[in-house]
Image (cartoon, grey):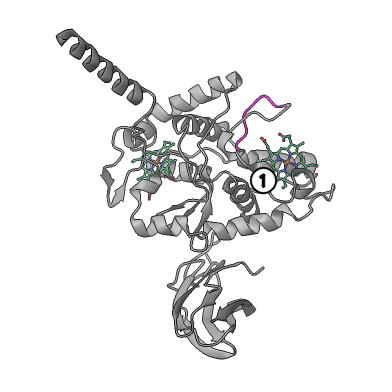
Amino acid sequence: MMRLRIGLCLASVFVASLALAQGGIDKRRSGYQDMGPSLQKMQDDGTANPGMLFVQLGAQAWATPAGAANKACVDCHGASGATMKGVALRYPAIPEGADTPADLEARINLCRTANQKAAPLPPESRELLSLSAYVAHQSRGQPIAPPDDPRLAPFRERGAALWAARQGQLNLSCAACHDDNAGKKLAGVTIPEAHPTGYPVYRLEWQTLGSLKRRLRNCLVGIRAESYAYDSPEYVMLELFLMERARGMAFEAPAVRP
Amino acid sequence: MANVLINAPKTARRGEIIEIKALILHPMETGFRPGTNGSIIARNIIERFTATWNGDEIFRIDLSPAIAANPFVSFFAVATDSGTVSLRWSGDEGFQVEESIAITVE
């Protein structure tokens, strides 16, 4: 009798820890959870979230022919944009025929140059951000799912090293704030865990939509480090690392951030 | 290009108070900021927003340079008759946008 009870007890402990190990509790927090209820509502309401204005612009650009090929995105990818469902969740990735990873904006620009025979759109330009917001919005609510491409591993590792390295006049690493002090205050601001769940985001401070790159540049400037050029591979490496770190978290683009 | 998002009910009971919300893409450039070359960027704001219900004005605001980009306007109206609610934004550089929505009052 006694032995049976101990057996049952052990079995239930085992079942409970199994549930935990299977990710019963995910302690990661998106920047969304650090915002007040009014900003959360603004993000959730499709007619109050200013990022949706850019999604609307993106839908127009999606259907507008461009370049020497005079082709629109619709001509190859379909009118609804539904073919882009899930795409933003697995970038940066290595495009076919390439050997280095591209983020979503770079992948869109690849279609601009290779398929539309048009000039690439400048970084942070309204048209590029609108197209990436339109593409990213198709994946809203789905879990972030980086590809299991072994060729990405060395790039992601370099991203992890950048994350951990102290830099700038303030001699801080990304990890010093976002791993070690997340949830605490920096001046009046809650330090988020820095998950790339919502990009491109409408940041109230910017009063416009901005890419993950722009956000990373902001943090680099904040620690008085020299930010990398817009087309440098360091951003893509950091983005790869951040997407892996946020694997499985719900995608929110276009999110709102303070 | 006009880029507007409107949130309003399509139907309402007679006498019901309804909320109409509208968001518009606009830089709301203050006219106080120097550009990268040091000279002041010309002011470019929306100066006025008006709403009419079947042609009668029901709501109006004057906007100022202190209002953020992409202004969001929310107001309430009493639903009286079925018809058209027209929203108009006008401002610097000849900015003129009009969007209309139909509301059925039962």
Up-down: is A88 above or below A207?
above
Q: Residue at x 66, y 38 (%)?
A: A107
Span shown in magenta: A98-103
Outermost residue toward the bottom? B56
| Mark 1 chain | A
Q: Can see residue A88?
A: yes
**Prevailing secondary structure of the magenta residues:** loop
Outermost residue toward the front? A1
Q: Is residue B93 left or right of residue A39?
A: right
Three-letter amino acid code of the residue under disc 1: Ala
B37 falls in the magenta region: no
Up-down: is A127 above or below A102?
below
* Among the 4 quarters of the image, the one containing residue B10: bottom right
Residue of label 1: A82
* Among the 4 quarters of the image, the one containing residue A89: top right
Q: Quadrant of the C terminus of chain A?
A: bottom left
Closer to the camera in the image, A242 or B14: B14
Q: Position of residue A196 (x, y in %)?
A: 47, 40
Q: Can see residue B89?
A: no
Q: Position of residue A32 (x, y in %)?
A: 40, 48
Q: Is residue A98 left or right of residue B99?
A: right
Q: Quadrant of the N terminus of chain A?
A: top left
Q: Could you classify mark 1 by the number of other residues whose Cα lies within 10 Å: few (under 14), some (14-19), or many (20 or more)?
A: few
Q: Position of residue A7 (x, y in %)?
A: 23, 11
Closer to the camera in the image, B26 or A138: A138
Closer to the camera in the image, B27 or A57: A57
